Image: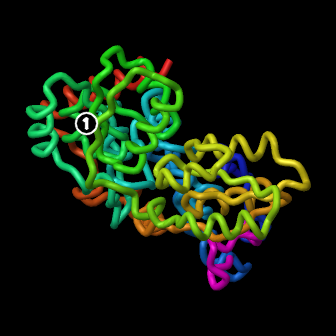
Amino acid sequence: MQNLFANNRYDCRSPEDLHDILKDVHESNPFVRYTIDECRKLFPKIQEINRLKQEKNAIILAHSYVHPDIIYTVADHTGDSFGLSLIAKESNHSTIVFPSVRFMAETAKILNPLKTVIDPNTNGGCSLAESIDSKTVQKLKQTYPEHTFVCYINTTAAVKAECDVCVTSSNVYKIIENIPNNKIFFLPDALMGKNLQQYVKDKKIPKQIDIFLSGSCYVHEGFNTDEVLKLKQSHPGLKILAHPECSPSVVSEAEMVASTTGLMDHITKTATKDDVYLLLTECGISSRLKVERPDIKLVGSCMMCKYMKSNHLDNIKNALANPLPSQIIEIPEHIQKKAIRCIENMFTLAK
């Protein structure tokens, strides 16, 4: 019998296998459990997706924030936006399915204009991406004509087309340092922008960073400094790890600030049996640790992204079998050409 799960790290051949992988995951909600009955309902969908994936020569790239029943059964690769962008660029599959949010699927299409890129998400928005549009960037460029315009990857293709270089949470600091211009305008994440301003100040890097003040990730913006301090007091030695989309006051309490992949890698490589962690990012990282490192101790609560969690196995199955026109990413050629320059500059400056 052909193994439909050969491309996934978890060789899940039965509902019982699936339950064994996910039984300890509850996504920060005690009522959301992967019971054996739930796994029996999910398993036929998983089998069909993996069959369709082979039939259509498709690769599935899943962000760490989507549901674990996607990550550990049908996803060929899981990670953050930068790592998945690299994989999308290097993929030799004719179809790319990107369960994440819309701007990530757009980025994959920018890098692979001749391939079919499918966004299965029925609610693939992003509070950051929706906070700015290309016309706003055009006006800002008139106001700041001497600046290099740096956009976070959480932006539409049209916004990327108006900017000089794109960054992600895993490479933003390196790129800011490598940009030859000392005048930089960063958009759209105001909180990450403020963290950048503090970073160049602390490192004595001679950069003037002006920022767009209206954008934020509602998930990371929701972490409260007072709650972090209370947990710190009640758990002596608590190791606090934060995503750079958190507020500067929250970031100042963290011993490490990194992308989702950076946070995962740090914990899995350095954690000891006595360590206790507070993760200030979306719940997907906690869920992954429950599967991959159940021995690691976590305290506090996480925040869930309603957009990322709108990805479901049913959506992926239907999109693979018969995608709707709205699920197939199309980018006008003039935007494609300008946006790919912005992204290619990211790959160059991130080296």
Which amino acid type corresponds to the residue marked 1 in the rendered image?
Lys
* Residue 124 inside the magenta-drawn segment: no
Spot occupied by residue 87 in the image (x, y as percentages of width and height): 50, 33
Q: Residues within 10 Å of mark 1 (few under 14, many from 20)?
A: many
Magenta span covers which residues?
22-33
Residue shown at the point (37%, 24%) measured from the top left: 207
Question: Does residue 124 appear left or right of residue 57 in this picture?
Answer: left
Viewer-side residue, 27 vs 42: 27
Residue 66 higher or lower than 88, as above or below: below
Residue shown at the point (71%, 52%) measured from the top left: 1
Q: Is residue 311 visible?
A: no
Spot occupied by residue 285 in the image (x, y as percentages of width and height): 63, 56
Residue position marked by numbered label 1 in the rendering: 160
Q: Is residue 257 visible?
A: yes
* Prevalent SS, magenta region: loop
The residue most toward the right is 273
Residue shown at the point (40%, 34%) measured from the top left: 167
Viewer-side residue, 151 vs 122: 151
In what element is the residue under mark 1?
helix
Picture quadrant of residue 27: bottom right
Viewer-side residue, 191 vs 34: 191
Residue 149 higher or lower than 81, as above or below: above
Question: Does residue 185 appear left or right of residue 299 in this picture?
Answer: left
